[in-house]
Amino acid sequence: GESVGLHLPTLSVQEGDNSIINCAYSNSASDYFIWYKQESGKGPQFIIDIRSNMDKRQGQRVTVLLNKTVKHLSLQIAATQPGDSAVYFCAETRGSARQLTFGSGTQLTVLP
Amino acid sequence: DAGVIQSPRHEVTEMGQEVTLRCKPISGHNSLFWYRQTMMRGLELLIYFNNNVPIDDSGMPEDRFSAKMPNASFSTLKIQPSEPRDSAVYFCASSSPGQREEAFFGQGTRLTVV
């Protein structure tokens, strides 16, 4: 069935290192992808998005890569900081649908 | 704008009682979503409104759940009667018309049914 899933449930990185969080999706019709960050006790917060007509998009310290051939999405965080510790979700939608389907999330822990 | 506002932040109720969760979307947004988050099932879409009209309620668990959007600035999610398995964090989100579909989330309501 349709699903958006994550490769790893947890990821620990040293402060200052780069982080890479991965996500797989199964529906080839998915055409819009978003990464959200959720801190404890808060709602998901938008980080960066990408459309299927692109394979890379950069923001401030974050880069999203999209590989449509293998239906894989990744979020790269440069120079990871303690404030980056959170759960990261990928989400997707397709066509005219506005509702998002979320993956299961990856817990990122930044070690001092 | 203050963002999506949900109330209450926390709700503890006894099994069998009626629970009403409230949401005020961001002004100008025409899509509103109710999500439920649990450890076991993650973030699940319950229902989605567009221009105050329910578009997709396939995620609503059962008849005990109902949602309304009487106007563009207010929505409710009601559970009657509540059960312990309804315990979760319920999020409301809204998004604006146009090409981008990013949804802005509220802080959530943590519901505990005992």
Image (tube, coloured by chain):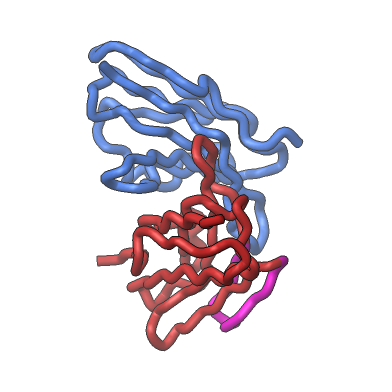
Q: Quadrant of the C terminus of chain A?
A: bottom right
Q: Residue at x 47, y 68 (%)?
A: A21
Q: Residue at x 65, y 63 (%)?
A: B99
Q: Is residue A53 magenta?
A: yes
Point 47% across, 52% down: residue: A87
- Which residues, given as a range, are shown in magenta? A48-60
Question: Which chain is the one coloured blue?
Answer: B
* B69 in relation to B95, above or below: above
Image-based side of A35 in relation to A10, left or right: right
Q: Is residue A56 located in the magenta-colored stretch of the structure?
A: yes
Question: Residue B24 location, x and y as percent?
Answer: 61, 29
Apparent colour of chain A:
red
| Residue A102 visible here | no
Can see residue A67?
yes
Residue that appears at 51% across and 50% down: A86
Considering depth in this image, is A41 or B74 the residue closer to the camera?
A: A41
